[in-house]
């Protein structure tokens, strides 16, 4: 879980621990950070919620749902495997170079 405040400076954050959790198949609850939402979509093993009660409720929901938690963890792992393949990373880097 990453309960960052939803502020401008945090909005650009891409907390590496979320990527690490997802790569290990751990479903994650995160505040709505644009940097994260651009990388991993809602439902791909990450749930985005506002800090406070909605954030805590999302955690509780997964704690009470073994099957849902396992399925979300498997989706998270698949998404990181897709995003972090060498071919995908190189293609993204080449695209960034072309745009520059």
Image (cartoon, helix red, strand yellow):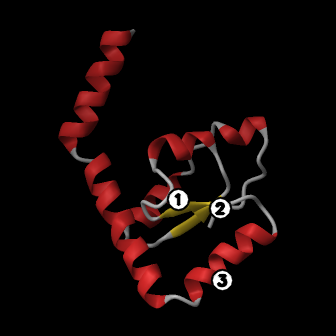
Residue on which disc 1 sits: 17
- Furthest toward the left, the residue is 87
On the image, which quarter does residue 47 sit in? bottom right
Placement of the N terminus among the 4 image quadrants: bottom right
SS of the residue at dot 2? Answer: loop
Residue on which disc 3 sits: 60
Q: Residue at x 58, y 87 (%)?
A: 63
In the rendered structure, the answer to whether residue 13 lies left or right of residue 51 reads left
Q: For mark 3, does the 10 Å Cα neighbourhood hold few (<14), some (14 to 19), or many (20 or more) residues?
A: few
Closer to the camera in the image, 81 or 60: 60
The answer to whether marks 2 and 1 mark residues whose Cβ atoms lie closer than 8 Å is yes
Q: How far from the left and from the top, in percent, is residue 8?
A: 76, 35
The answer to whether marks 3 and 2 mark residues whose Cβ atoms lie closer than 8 Å is no
Residue on which disc 2 sits: 2
CA distance for labels 3 and 2: 15 Å
Q: Residue at x 73, y 54 (%)?
A: 4
Observer-side mark, 2 or 1, equals 2
SS of the residue at dot 1? Answer: helix
């Amino acid at each position: 879980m990453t309960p960052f405040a939803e502020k401008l400076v945090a909005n650009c954050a891409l907390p590496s621990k979320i990527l690490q959790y997802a790569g290990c198949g751990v479903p994650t609850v995160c505040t709505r950070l644009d940097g994260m939402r651009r990388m991993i979509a809602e439902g791909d093993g990450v749930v985005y919620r506002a800090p406070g009660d909605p954030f805590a409720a999302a955690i509780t929901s997964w704690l009470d749902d073994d099957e849902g938690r396992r399925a979300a963890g498997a989706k998270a792992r698949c998404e990181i495997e897709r995003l972090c393949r060498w071919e995908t990373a190189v293609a993204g880097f080449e695209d960034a170079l072309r745009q520059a």
